[in-house]
Amino acid sequence: MQVAQAGELALLVGRDRRTFIIRLTPGAHLHTHRGVLPHDELIGAPWGSWRHSHLGYPFLILQPSTDDLVRDLKRNTQIVYPKDAGYILMKMRIAPGQRVIEAGTGSGGMTLVLAQAVAPGGRVYSYEVRPEMQQLARANLERLGLAAYVEFKLQDIAAGFDEREVAALFLDLPNPWDYLAQAHQALANGGFFGCILPTTNQVSCLIDALEKHGFGLIEVEELLLRQYKAVAARLRPMDRMVAHTGYLIFARAIVRPEE
Amino acid sequence: MQVAQAGELALLVGRDRRTFIIRLTPGAHLHTHRGVLPHDELIGAPWGSWRHSHLGYPFLILQPSTDDLVRDLKRNTQIVYPKDAGYILMKMRIAPGQRVIEAGTGSGGMTLVLAQAVAPGGRVYSYEVRPEMQQLARANLERLGLAAYVEFKLQDIAAGFDEREVAALFLDLPNPWDYLAQAHQALANGGFFGCILPTTNQVSCLIDALEKHGFGLIEVEELLLRQYKAVAARLRPMDRMVAHTGYLIFARAIVRPEE
Amino acid sequence: MQVAQAGELALLVGRDRRTFIIRLTPGAHLHTHRGVLPHDELIGAPWGSWRHSHLGYPFLILQPSTDDLVRDLKRNTQIVYPKDAGYILMKMRIAPGQRVIEAGTGSGGMTLVLAQAVAPGGRVYSYEVRPEMQQLARANLERLGLAAYVEFKLQDIAAGFDEREVAALFLDLPNPWDYLAQAHQALANGGFFGCILPTTNQVSCLIDALEKHGFGLIEVEELLLRQYKAVAARLRPMDRMVAHTGYLIFARAIVRPEE
Amino acid sequence: MQVAQAGELALLVGRDRRTFIIRLTPGAHLHTHRGVLPHDELIGAPWGSWRHSHLGYPFLILQPSTDDLVRDLKRNTQIVYPKDAGYILMKMRIAPGQRVIEAGTGSGGMTLVLAQAVAPGGRVYSYEVRPEMQQLARANLERLGLAAYVEFKLQDIAAGFDEREVAALFLDLPNPWDYLAQAHQALANGGFFGCILPTTNQVSCLIDALEKHGFGLIEVEELLLRQYKAVAARLRPMDRMVAHTGYLIFARAIVRPEE
């Protein structure tokens, strides 16, 4: 039976479904709304078992999913939701060994998903202009043990990307149309372009610019996630849901005649 | 500039958006509704460039995305759609190096996604009872160069799984409730359980059985994918969409008191 | 130019979009979070004009829509949302002059919509067993001037409905399958049956019972309403939405061979 | 027991769910894909009973719902779907006795719904510039016995509407922003404005124009209708659905300071 080890990440889930993600550290304590859990009582606990706080409140100790990790990130910005991130992997063939660019880094939510997907042989080049955001994302990725797969760059992409021949490039910033020449230059010919945008006006503007900058097979999609109350005798959708995270735009870098 | 090599997979997309996926083979020919493309004229072509059939019809030559590969699979069964497959990766922490079970194999659509996500160090154990389905899936995975990461098993899972301590287990079959004791036994404690089911009655039945077999944190979700016409000046959703692929059920294997 | 008259219903909408519905009464005062509006200053105001509270906060004075009226109802129960109510009118041919049964009355939200749609020549027979609910619904309908089109009945429908040959019958209660013989008896042959239910288990149970009680052309549908931020340069869906109000079930009363 | 009378509208539904709407006429015959049904055998049949074609194929005879009527309309244009039409009634307080404008008439689908909702005391003023469309709509409404509530006008609304002080005005045409001054002039102050548009670009353009022409409380919404397979033991959504009919835009005519 596998037990939680010092140094591992652990997800603690209270009976009320409130969650905490910690790195297990001898001598440390997790303070919750339902009492304290000393890490030393968690280290050595079988994964998937119940532990109790000093107030007797039960918590399940588990290894976190990617979805748990993304939702738990310390963040100052809107993150790419796991429903979108997983689909982006499928549409842009993010797979072990790939070299991938993203901009901006933001809080590192998409960086986390990309890093995990290209490991161990691949690499994520993550651009950001705000030092404090980069610092936050780097701390987030280091905490998760994924920073080794990421090269954090504090640069304005208006000046271009340093890399060439990358397999995929993802933009999560408000004015992607300003960086398409740079994106085309960094991508391998035929490479995967992806973007997420909140408004329809931005989507129209991006489609127009993609057509002018040598991109083809443009697709616009959105994903709606509907959650259900998991009660066997009274199965029904939750009352409310997230109605919008962003429109996803995908395209391919086409070789232009003059090239 | 990267060019298509003999032995590589290529996606050919006609100007009308009809697609073909082939493995480039010297001497072979691709016969389309718009004329013939000799592989020898595709080998050496820059990725992302236009080639013409003998009738002069233009085709774009690209490396396929995971989404393209799944949609192109030869299949006898309903496949797990990429929108669902990508989300399953996020919810079940399918990552490089993991050991994962799936049953049944079906046409191999989910097998493909799992194999690509756990490569190079991980392994997919894929169970199926119909020999002809397994053969199809194996052929599909071999064609994509992913069979090395999969162990195909022609076995009835009623007798149990051969593996122990696997990180994640995914069931895509009509009566998952019949195999939960076996699933719990194969999973590492705290491991990820996932399932896809078409009807609400099946979902209710599974929730009930999961609760009885030592699973916790049960979640039921569904994803709706909405595609847009990517025209900058007339942006709008497509007229029709896929309304239902399946309900996704996730749970964690809990350590029971007696264990 | 039409002006607000004493005795009319008025909708007041603050600049912050908070709304109030009142019956204009000489001498009365509307107390809002942004100051007081004396009815005497509203009476005689042009509809569609701005009025100010004693604190100078602007309010628009308008005639309320049916949607406004339903949302404003004093209620102790879940109401039928306008998106569902409007569709029910279309599916059950609720039109001026019809005789329609509903049970239970609840807070009167659906009663309001039905009464308005069958007026002036039609009639709504509305059954309820909880006296306090009936009283609330009656007060709601009287306030809106629609009580004349409704016959409120404080009766258990297990004993049957008093009416015969009604054009349409709508059930909004948790166990509709218990009243299908009574419903069939009250409906004209070929009449319209409708129901709203929150869980999938209830829907399955009702379909089964409808088939056994001489109903045909059974349909199950649901409506999702998505609202957008109405900003021309930044058009996008709202962040969150109501994900579930209920499943709508429609059927027709079929003449059985023995009849 | 009510029986079908000569002169009434009847919906015939084959066991395969194919539908036909006819006006019962002595001596006439309904020719279906499953044989002939003489009207004389339908006249006198109880509503809600089964009749057989000369080939023995069973058809249910019913009174059509508004939904049935709209879907059955002879049409040359996109119609307003019943899900949208019903909601429009709720948002624009279309009720018995109201005076309402619509433009363009199109095939008369929305005209039908409006006419039925304002009858018997109200009136629909329906504008159209294409004579052949108006003729089709008029024939459709006459066939349904609703033409008495409609004034069909063959006029270009650029020159303004003939009516004043109407309660509600609905535009279903591609460039509504060109007619907002005319709309504001025709509407009662505070009156209800509504519109349906297919693209996001049109919605942005309309919002902008509404703000400039004295409209307030602008709302943008859309409705998604999801249908289920009504099988008690295997309840599930249909495989495919209509993903987009149009965006609904609502606003109120505000009294401008200078007025």
Image: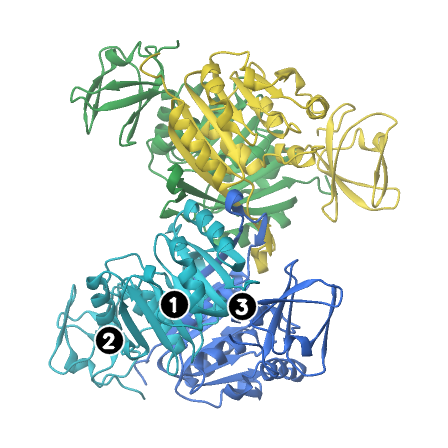
Chain colours: A yellow, B green, C blue, D cyan
Q: Is residue B154 in view?
A: no
Left or right: C83 in relation to A133: left
Q: Amino acid at mark 1?
A: Ile
Does the residue at mark 1 contact the one at mark 3 (Cβ under 8 Å)?
no
Label 1, residues with CA under 10 Å away: few <14, some 14-19, many ≥20:
some
Does the residue at mark 1 contact the one at mark 2 (Cβ under 8 Å)?
no
Q: Name the residue carrying label 3.
A: C67
Q: Is residue A118 in view?
A: yes
Of C67 and B174, the residue lying toward us: C67
Query: Do marks 1 and 3 share a subunit?
Result: yes
Q: Name the residue carrying label 1.
A: C218
Secondary structure of the residue carrying numbered label 1: strand
Label 3, residues with CA under 10 Å away: few <14, some 14-19, many ≥20:
many
Q: Residue at x 29, y 11 (%)?
A: B43
Q: Amino acid at mark 2?
A: Glu
Number of the label disc, if any, that sits on residue D142:
2
Q: In the rendering, at what x and y percent does residue B59 appear?
A: 27, 23
Q: Residue at x 68, y 79 (%)?
A: C40
Q: Amino acid at mark 3?
A: Asp
Q: In the rendering, at what x and y percent does residue A73 appear?
A: 69, 32
Q: In the rendering, at what x and y percent does residue B7 appear?
A: 34, 12
